Amino acid sequence: MWKKNTDKSSSNKSDRQKLRAANISIASNLIFVLLKFIVGFATGAVSIISEALHSLNDLIASLIARYSLGQSSKPPDEKHRYGHGKIEDVSALIEGMLILFAVIFILYEAIRRIISGKFEIELIDMGIAIMLISAVTNFFVSQYLHSTAKKTNSPALEADALHLRTDVYTALGVFLGLIIVKFTEILILDSIIAIAVAIIIIRAALKMILKSGKNLMDIKLPKTEEDKIIVNLLTFCTVIKFTSIVILLQKVSKMTI
């Protein structure tokens, strides 16, 4: 009874940590979505607008992650005998696809400006400032999310941390690009930077989609891990049917993903 209560208390603490981290991510993303869109349209810099769209995507992803965490913490029931943990992988898969859709707009707008040759950027100092603040803030938030994801074994938080870490790199890229534009007045760099941001986003999205897809497909454990499990089972059991081993391996696979 004492052990059961301890396990329940530990689980509740883990759930609270997950939800706290998700709420911080939502608040951070919401603030920077508003700031980047305001500054992006004020300056006319497509690189900042692309970053605003990136942050909007992160906000949506954070909201999905927050919902999935609330659902995954529910105990097993008659229809979901192994719990609701898989919903976190579904969340990560949706987040990855959302990112890919956002990239289409970024690429379209950047290429359109390059082809038309029309580049208009104003109030560039404001854009430089918001990109630097965004990069620094998201660095610390992503580190916190990553740490919490590792402690609580949360795929949704790990995906959210990856989003923000990518946002740090892209924001720094836009920041440096805007500084170069400011001093060289080579305005086409703004669109080139936006395309570079899009490529980074595509890479992160594909990585996330592939990982969550593998988890949802319940890909088998490495043979070395399977062998260890079987050896441990044989140590404590005199006779084990192979059908039972398969069922146990499936359960362990779901718990360790």
Image: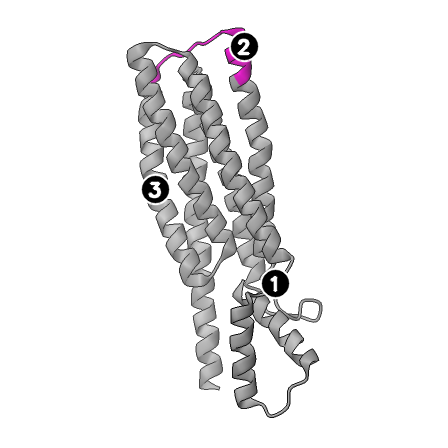
Q: Residue at x 56, y 72 (%)?
A: 226
Q: Is residue 177 above or below residue 257?
A: above
Relative image position of residue 70 (x, y in whole percent): 55, 57
Q: Secondary structure at mark 1?
A: loop
Q: 183 or 57, which is in the foreground?
A: 183
Q: Is residue 90 above or below residue 180?
A: below
> Of callouts 2 and 1, which one flags the residue occurring earlier in the amino acid sequence?
1
Relative image position of residue 227 (x, y in whole percent): 54, 75
Question: Of the residues shown, which amino acid type is indicated by label 3?
Answer: Phe
Disc 3 designates what residue? 139
Q: 132 or 26, which is in the foreground?
A: 132
Q: 231 or 73, which is in the foreground?
A: 231
> Of callouts 3 and 2, which one flags the residue occurring earlier in the amino acid sequence?
2
So how many labels did they put on this image? 3
Q: Which residue appears farthest toward the left when viewing the image?
A: 183
Disc 2 designates what residue? 115
Question: Of the residues shown, which amino acid type is indicated by label 2?
Answer: Ile
Instruction: Report if residue 120 lies within the magenta region.
Output: yes
Quarter of the view holding residue 255: bottom right
Q: Is residue 163 above or below residue 103?
A: below
Relative image position of residue 209 (x, y in whole percent): 58, 46
Report crowding for label 1: few under 14, some 14 to 19, many 20 or more residues within 10 A (C-alpha): some
The residue segment tinted magenta is 111-124
Disc 1 designates what residue? 84
Report whether residue 52 is seen: no
